[in-house]
Image (spheres, helix red, strand yellow):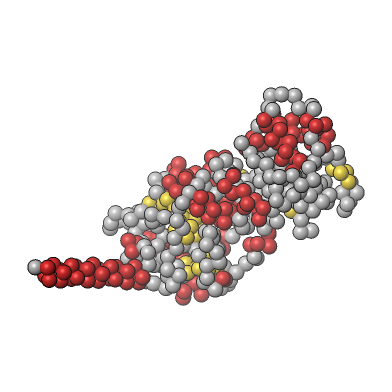
Amino acid sequence: MAYFGRMAAVLSGAVIFYLFLNKASRLLLEGPFRFNARWKEFHGSLEPVIELLMNDSYQIFETDLAASHSDMRAGEMWKPVERKPFQNVAIIIPFRDRDEHLNKLLYLLIPLLKKQKLSFRIIVAEQRGSGMFNKGRLLNAAFDYARGNYRVGCVIFHDVDMLPEDDHIPYSCAKWPMHLGAYVNTFNYTLLYSILTGGVLAMNSDQMEMVNGYSNEYWGWGGEDDDMGKRLLSKRLKLVRPDPLLARYTMFTHTKRYDQEPKYIRRVLTDTLLRMRSDGLNSKAWTITEVARTALFDRLLIEASSIETTDNGLDFIRLTEHPEENKVVQKFPYNCNELRYVTIPFQEHLRYTTREMLHSIEFAVMLREELKTLFPPQMCKKCAAPSIHRTRSTRPIVRRLFLVIWRRSGQSTDHLSRSITPPISPPRLAVT
């Protein structure tokens, strides 16, 4: 009896091991998202079409797209007729002055979404004006619009210059946030770093709300995607990616994004977790000024904040949400642009700001009066013109002044400038 018992145990173990190997092999072949990999329904590689789309002389017009997709209705989500939709998906595309790329992306993307039996609506988020681009605010505004106007459980943030090379790529949401656009031709189809979320990112609405959306503080291209990666990790949301042999993308060739990246982005990334609760969906740092619903997509015209730049390689930023301070950001001492924005140096290890304090107008007024005493108008080394504009809160003495005024709010602050002197090498101050 003992012999037969051991044999039964060995056989059962062998069966379990075989089933495990069989499942592992299927996962290896189909990728980690088997539930959405209905291979036989798709055509496969889209590279021949992409070769045609990459030709600048090949034009696609929105009217032709609308005629070829006559089953799509303005203001409604497209749904498959023959079966229940797999998921309700909103595709959000940040955009400005790229109509040619947008039409080519839709030419490729709409048939892909239909083949995957998804109920979907495409939302194009366009920034108004010619100021510096703020992708995070566009994505937040479009997500807020999508959840208020459509019943969507899955949201895919899709750059307008990213073309999927295969229609097996699962355009849906899984248990964890899914980074679809990790492997791009311009980077030789390699993952640059672990927290990368740029290009194409899929997550459900609950996950987006859990991390409070994207940051609103990144101007120009770059930074907001890495910030999102840090937010996901802080909430213990695992970032997954499909098989690199499957999920490949081709990027349109155009002016490099990071040529326009402000130099302060690298510094803003350091305080992601400190800003996370107040910087995102709940801060409403945008205004949707116009909504145009067409058969193919909803087009949102969004008013972000403003940024002032010069052509000499230096970036000067004006935060119009807090006009009482009218701050600028730059580490080069006592230089100004044509708007007479002057800057002063700051300690690099004191990068953390207390942005929550700036939401109080009364506090901002008190701070402005203190700064008049602490920092008299400086003479610009470039133009020898005086400036009355002040600096960002990354200045150590200003940070220290923030804390003092904040903790003594409601009391007179006339004596503060006399009792506080700029420290030579101050320790980092914690905000309580």
Residue 288's image quarter? top right
- Residue 102 shows in this picture: no
Point out residue 300 in the picture as x, y percentages from the top left corner: 54, 48
**Which quarter shows the N terminus?**
bottom left
Instruction: Tell me if residue 267 comes above or below residue 364 in the rendering.
Output: below
Please give the name of the residue rendered at 69% of the width and 28% of the height, measured from the top-left corner. 408
Please give the name of the residue rendered at 74% of the width and 49% of the height, measured from the top-left corner. 347
Of 235 and 152, the residue lying toward us: 235
**Which quarter shows the C terminus?**
top right
- Residue 262 shows in this picture: yes
Residue situated furthest front in the rendering: 2
Instruction: Tell me if residue 141 comes above or below residue 259 in the rendering.
Output: above
Residue 256 shown left or right of residue 105 in the figure = right
Please give the name of the residue rendered at 46% of the width and 51% of the height, measured from the top-left corner. 236
Instruction: Tell me if residue 329 comes above or below residue 24 in the rendering.
Output: above
Of 293 and 341, the residue lying toward us: 341
Residue 113's image quarter? bottom left
Of 159 and 101, the residue lying toward us: 159
Point out residue 396 in the picture as x, y percentages from the top left corner: 74, 43
